[in-house]
Amino acid sequence: MQTIRDLSQLRRVRGALRGKVAFVPTMGALHAGHRRLMEIARENADHVIASIFVNPLQFAKNEDLSRYPRREEADAEMLADTGVTILWMPDAATMYPHGFATTVTVSGVSEGLCGASRLGHFDGVATVVAKLFGQIRPNIALFGEKDWQQLAVVRRMVIDLDLGISVIGVPTERDADGLALSSRNAYLSVEERRAAVALPQALDNAANTVMMDKPIRDAEAQAMQDLENAGFRIDYVAIVDSDLRPAKTLADADRIVAAAWIGTTRLIDNRAIKATA
Ligand code: AMP
């Protein structure tokens, strides 16, 4: 695996690659969820390029940019081990040089849910992903379903801008108790980690409730109650349709999505709602 920090070198090395190139953007502090993305990338392409860049544009001023975990060496080892060919590690000056003035905004799908509680977040995501796509020019790109709204934003952007990249969504990797793996789980105290399992459990219960044809809003309310009982402060819990709008009927209900705080850590999760035939 070659670690590259310089854009002209990236272009040279990328230009020499033949065959299908898969790209997996990350912010580092890698875990088994990221590993899964790399493995699926490897299965679907001749070369895998991963990036590690903690993108300041997608953090609001009061968010955790400065304390976001950074583990370059362990990350590089893990990536090499999964067959990644190139690790792209630009710094902020390479990504956003003096005079940088472009913002990519994907309206509609960016606006509710995390977009409402993290203002500017998806502009930051869309801008950095568009830029990384331009630098790497991949044939396919992989994103986790854990960040369900992010996946929808990227899909929309790729369609709208005719980027010609196949976006593959990868199912969420979880710990044995069901908590979705996340770099931010490192912030949790032992007690918070124990309580955090209430998040996937609340979503599972609500999804099962909806599938039994109970009212959607009751299922959401129950999930919120479960989370509050476990000590979470809720950002949102919503049962949404495939366009991430509030689902009105069981037939519309595609996904239950949630974001909630435990202590000073904000966790997100989602799961499919599969209506019984
Ligand atoms: P991040 O480093 O958090 O920006 O995540 C990089 C990519 O890994 C994103 O596409 C995430 O959706 C994906 N990802 C993060 N956690 C998981 C997980 N538990 N399972 C699958 N993919 C994940």
Image (cartoon, rainbow, N blue to C red):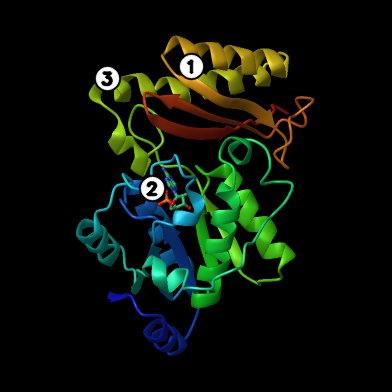
Question: What residue sits 75% from the left and 29% below the top?
Answer: 247
In the picture of the structure, the residue carrying the numbered disc 1 is 227
Question: What residue sits 44% from the left and 57% below the top?
Answer: 55
In the picture of the structure, the residue carrying the numbered disc 3 is 191
Question: What residue sits 58% from the left and 66% below the top?
Answer: 130
- Disc 3/disc 1 C-alpha distance (Å): 15 Å
Give the left or right position of residue 155, taking residue 69 as reference: right
3 or 1: tag closer to the N-terminus: 3
Say which of 149 and 99 sits in front: 99
* Residue 137 in sight: no
Crowd rating for badge 2 (residues with CA inside 10 Å; few <14, some 14–19, many 20+): some
3 or 2: tag closer to the N-terminus: 2
Q: Quadrant of residue 249?
A: top right
Q: Are marks 3 and 1 in contact (CB under 8 Å)?
A: no
Give the left or right position of residue 145, taking residue 189 as reference: right
Q: Secondary structure at mark 2?
A: loop
Ligand 1 lies under 8 Å from the Cβ of mark 2: no
Does 37 sit above or below residue 90? above
* Residue type pointed to by label 2: Leu
Placement of the C terminus among the 4 image quadrants: top right
Nearer mark to the viewer, of 1 and 2: 2
Q: Secondary structure at mark 1?
A: helix
* Residue 238 in sight: yes
- Disc 3/disc 2 C-alpha distance (Å): 24 Å
Question: What residue sits 38% from the left and 47% below the top?
Answer: 65
In the picture of the structure, the residue carrying the numbered disc 2 is 65
* Residue type pointed to by label 1: Leu
